[in-house]
């Protein structure tokens, strides 16, 4: 589990800036207590835990930016939870971090690839107006 914690810490601390477009990725653990589900800071993980990744993208330009494709690797030892992908349209997944196809990714036999085989998730943002912000989320289960 230490490897997962390291990966999570690395991703949480990742803040990239490109042409005045800010990308901020955070991760939280989903916890249910007394019938209430909340997100809390990740201190450690165990098999079966659900982690939720949130990516905020902000266009800090005075003009429109186009063709943004936020791509996030899915950590090793986790399984994508498609029901926790937001927005749940216009996203693609990859099993090799090279080829991206709409979910569910179909194998050569025409059957959906198991969710545990996905290695990355990607959305497409055609354009963002000045000072616009977009929010993307996905969840994974720790194996």
Image (spheres, rainbow, N blue to C red):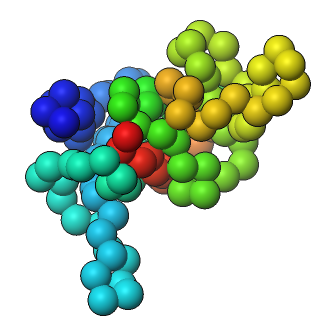
**Do we see residue 48 in this rendering?**
yes
Q: Is residue 32 left or right of residue 7?
A: right
Q: Quadrant of the C terminus?
A: top left
Which residue is at a point 66% across and 39% down the rendered structure image? 91
**Do we see residue 126 in this rendering?**
no
Question: Taking 12 as reference, is 82 above or below it?
Answer: below
Q: Is residue 44 left or right of residue 110?
A: left
How many numbered discs, if any? 0
Q: Position of residue 132 (x, y in %)?
A: 50, 51
Task: Determine the residue located farthest toward the bottom in the rendered image.
Answer: 34
Question: Taking 46 as reference, is 20 above or below it?
Answer: above
Task: Determine the residue located farthest toward the right in the rendered image.
Answer: 110
| Quadrant of residue 49 within the rendered picture | bottom left
From the viewer's side, name the closer residue of 21 and 143: 143
| Quadrant of residue 41 within the rendered picture | bottom left
Q: Quadrant of the N terminus?
A: top left
Q: Is residue 33 left or right of residue 65?
A: left
Which residue is at a point 23% across and 34% down the rendered structure image? 4
Q: Position of residue 78 (x, y in %)?
A: 40, 37
Which residue is at a point 33% across and 76% down the rendered structure image? 32
Q: Position of residue 60 (x, y in %)?
A: 39, 41
Q: Position of residue 141 (x, y in %)?
A: 42, 48
């Amino acid at each position: 589990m230490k490897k997962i914690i390291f990966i999570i810490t690395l991703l949480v601390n990742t803040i990239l800036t490109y042409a005045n477009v800010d990308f901020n990725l955070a991760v939280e653990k989903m916890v249910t207590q007394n019938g209430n589900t909340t997100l809390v800071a990740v201190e450690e993980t165990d098999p079966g835990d659900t982690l939720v990744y949130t990516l905020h993208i902000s266009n800090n330009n005075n003009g429109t930016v186009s063709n943004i494709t936020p791509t996030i690797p899915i950590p090793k030892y986790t399984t994508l939870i498609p029901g926790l992908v937001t927005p749940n349209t216009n996203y693609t997944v990859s099993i090799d971090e090279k080829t991206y196809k709409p979910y569910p990714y179909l194998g050569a036999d025409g059957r959906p690839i198991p969710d545990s085989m996905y290695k990355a998730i990607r959305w497409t943002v055609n354009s963002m107006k000045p000072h616009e912000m977009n929010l993307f989320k996905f969840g994974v289960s720790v194996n």
